[in-house]
Amino acid sequence: MSEVMEIANGGVIWLFAGMIISIVVFQGLLFIRLASKSSSAVGMTKGEVRSALRTGAISAIGPSLAIMVIAISLITFLGDPLTLMRIGIIGSAPIEALGASIGADAYGAQLGAAGYTAEALTTVVWTLCLGGAGGLFVVAVFTKSFGKLEKKASSKSKDGKGVILITTAALIGAFSFFAGGEAVKGYIHLFVAVGAGVSMICMQKLADKRNLVWLKEWSLGLAILAGLFTGYLFT
């Protein structure tokens, strides 16, 4: 296992991981710059742009904490650079953990077990890279087509709210699917989901009533803390 980790944490792996993460950071900064420049075209003020950036940054804290917990366990099997590269691109630690397990099983080994050799690590890495390539390929090839489809759908809506309604419903459905999958695991999971959901609704109503912009920015992080506190009470 120690020899496998020497390979996983080698300089060559760090080089490739560093190159990929640098591209991700560059893209993020570029998108922020382009969005800031285009804000005036959609009627956003500089204050609203800063508020949107703060909201995005704060909202990322809660989900990132959950990712960090799983990332720490992945480091044990994949090493530092590979974990950084995969989490930095995909951003879904549970999916990467599942992919690593599938790759190891395909080779006939278990993560961290005696049969986890350098060849097994290679199989895991190929599984993760090929498994994540599909989504990246679709984004790279079909994003422009999706944009045209969105414009076409918007043009058929009289007030332009049809696409907003569809996308909002899709987001609610996606998050409800994941939250529902956790809630059915047991009564504690259900109470955590309800506690977080009720706190979010209360904060949104309070923020709208008293025009508390900062509360909207912090609402996701506070809702996660409310869910954690609810779980603590019932355990």
Image (cartoon, helix red, strand yellow):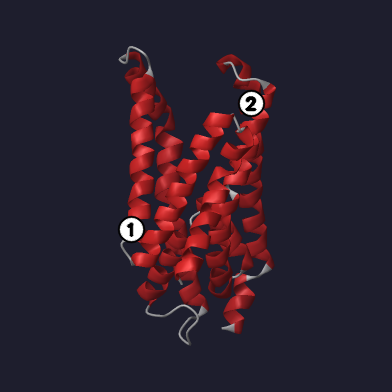
Kindly indicate the quadrant of the structure image that contains residue 170.
top left
- Most extreme residue toward the bottom is 114
Sequence-wise, which precedes: disc 2 or disc 1?
2
Q: Position of residue 16 (x, y in %)?
A: 63, 57
Q: Position of residue 11 (x, y in %)?
A: 69, 66
Nearer to the camera, 53 or 80:
53
Residue visible at 54% across and 60% down in the picture: 67
Residue visible at 52% across and 77% down in the picture: 118
Do the residues bearing badges 2 and 1 touch, measured as CB atoms within 8 Å? no
Secondary structure type for disc 1: helix
Residue visible at 37% across and 32% down in the picture: 167
Q: Position of residue 105 (x, y in %)?
A: 37, 75
Q: Is residue 27 in view from this perspective?
A: no
Name the residue tied to disc 1: 181
Q: Is residue 213 left or right of residue 138?
A: right
| Quarter in which the N terminus is drawn | bottom right
Name the residue tied to disc 2: 48
